[in-house]
C-alpha cells in the first residue's frame, strides 16, 4: 500500500532583488502542511543560514529519531515492556566533500528510556536492533545508524 506525503515549501528570503547576487537573498523558507502549524526554516549557519531556525539537517536527524522512538514505543508495548518516558539527543555526523557537496556519514541515537521496575533490560535493549527493519525514515537513509540507549528505572507507573 502506498501513502502520499504532501508539503508546501515557500521561499521567504527575497530581500527585494531576488537572487541578483549571492549575498542578496536569505536562505529561509516555510514548510506548510494543510491543517498544521508552519515551520520556519533556514540553511545551515555554516552556509549562510539563520542559526535560530531549523535547517534540513536538523529536520532529518529529528525525523530519524522520532521515527525510531515511535517504533520503539510500539514494539515495547507489543513485548509487554512498559515505557513511561522517552527522550533522545541524537547526533549526526556530516562531511563536506571537495566541491562543496555534503552528506551524512553516520548517526547515533542516544535515547534515555524510562521503564518500570522489573523490566528485562536485555529485551528492552534488543528492540533497538529490530527498528531499522521497519522504521520508514531509517529504511530510507543511506548512512549507518547506531544506538546508545540509557535506561532509567521508575518504581511506579
Image: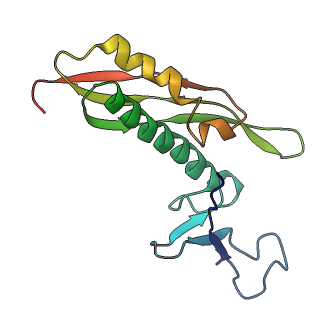
Which residue is drawn at the image coordinates 35% and 38% (left, top)?
A: 87
- Measuring from the top left, give residue 73's x and y in whole percent: 36, 36
Against 129, is 31 above or below? Answer: below
- Measuring from the top left, give residue 32's x and y in whole percent: 56, 73
Against 17, is 132 above or below? Answer: above
Which residue is drawn at the image coordinates 52% and 21% (left, top)?
A: 129
Q: Nearer the viewer, residue 151 or 49?
A: 151
Outermost residue, bottom side: 16
Residue 147 in view of the camera: no
- Measuring from the top left, give residue 84's x and y in whole percent: 23, 35
Dividing the picture into quarters, in which one does residue 89 lie?
top left
Judge left or right: residue 30 versus residue 88. right
Report the quarter where the C terminus lies: top left
Judge left or right: residue 110 versus residue 54. left
Judge left or right: residue 19 versus residue 51. right
Against 17, is 29 above or below? Answer: above
Dividing the picture into quarters, in which one does residue 115 lie?
top left
Which residue is drawn at the image coordinates 73% and 34% (left, top)?
A: 142
Outermost residue, right side: 99
Residue 21 in view of the camera: yes
Judge left or right: residue 134 versus residue 22. left
Amino acid at each position: 500500500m502506498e501513502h502520499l506525503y504532501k508539503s508546501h515549501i515557500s521561499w521567504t528570503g527575497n530581500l527585494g532583488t531576488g537572487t541578483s547576487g549571492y549575498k542578496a537573498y536569505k536562505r529561509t523558507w516555510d514548510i506548510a502542511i494543510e491543517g498544521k502549524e508552519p515551520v520556519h526554516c533556514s540553511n545551515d549557519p555554516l552556509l549562510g543560514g539563520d542559526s535560530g531556525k531549523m535547517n534540513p539537517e536538523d529536520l532529518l536527524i529529528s525525523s530519524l529519531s522520532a521515527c525510531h522512538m515511535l517504533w520503539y514505543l510500539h514494539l515495547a508495548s507489543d513485548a509487554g515492556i512498559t515505557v513511561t518516558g522517552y527522550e533522545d539527543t541524537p547526533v549526526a555526523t556530516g562531511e563536506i566533500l571537495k566541491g562543496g557537496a555534503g552528506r551524512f556519514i553516520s548517526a547515533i541515537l542516544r535515547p534515555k528510556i524510562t521503564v518500570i521496575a522489573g523490566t528485562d533490560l536485555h529485551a528492552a535493549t534488543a528492540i533497538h536492533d529490530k527498528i531499522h527493519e521497519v522504521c520508514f525514515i531509517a529504511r530510507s537513509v543511506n548512512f549507518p545508524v547506531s544506538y546508545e540507549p540509557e535506561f532509567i528505572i521508575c518504581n511506579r507507573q
